[in-house]
Image: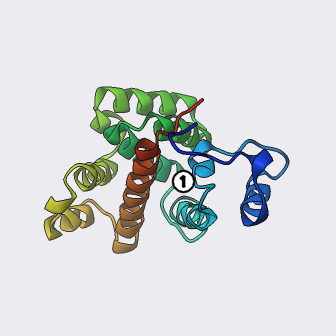
Amino acid sequence: MSWIESIPYEKAVGKLKAIYDRLSGGGKPIDHVLTVHGLRPHTLEGHLSLYRSVLHHSSNTLSPWLLEAIGTYVSILNGCEYCKVHHLRGVKNKLDDDLKFREILTAFQNRTLEIVFDNREVAAFDYARKLTETPAFIQPTDISNLRKSGWDDGEILEINQVVAYFNYANRTVLGLGVCLE
């Protein structure tokens, strides 16, 4: 599960139990990335709020599959197998196109994004890479490049927030030893 104590559904009480009940809605298992917050339920609430706002809010304008793909790419860059596996499923489900999904998977594995994604999307992935690997080197020209590729400022904000969220989630998972089993 993780390197620190995680509280499973069966042992949850009070506020944590109430959050778990909302999450499990019908007895579904609760992901380890969430149960790792069990000792501090307020951080679980913050994590969930950020996750939902960044990936699942009705006001987002980017395709849900693209948001998931950007997040998956960040997870690959960070070596976060847990998030990669979980969010590849999200890409597949939201894309609903098995052939395109297999092409994306191959592009991620071979680092050949330009074969599957258009120039506009590749610019978003380039920004995600730079913000993930060398955040101190982001410059105004990086934003200008996104604009030149066809992204408006609201879309740039969505891309930025997905990258920032996944870096947070990856560091939570990797830093606490959250595992898939």
User: What residue appears at the point 28 percent right and 38 percent down from the top-left corner?
Assistant: 114
**Residue at (60% x, 43% y) in the render:** 32
Judge the density around disc 1: few (<14), some (14-19), many (≥20) Cα neighbours within 10 Å: some
Instruction: Locate residue 64: give its quadrant.
Output: bottom right
Where residue 66 sits in the image (x, y, percent)?
46, 50
Task: State left or right for residue 10 relative to residue 114.
Answer: right
Is 164 placed left or right of 180 in the picture?
Answer: left
What residue appears at the point 31 percent right and 54 percent down from the top-left corner? 124
Q: Quadrant of the C terminus?
A: top right
Q: Amino acid at mark 1?
A: Pro
The image shows residue 139 at horizontal and vertical percentages of 15, 66
Residue under label 1: 64
* Label 1 residue SS: helix
137 vs 156, nearest the viewer: 137
Residue at coordinates 30% horizontally, 63% vertically from top-left?
150
Left or right side of 68 for 23: right
Which residue is at the front of the view, 126 or 167? 167
Seen from the viewer's position, the closer of residues 64 and 171 is: 171
Along the line of sight, the residue nearer the viewer: 25 or 35: 35
Quarter of the rendering occupied by the N terminus? top right
> Is the residue 164 above or below the residue 108 in the image?
below
Residue 171 location (% of width, % of height): 39, 49
Coordinates of residue 38 in the picture (x, y in percent): 63, 55
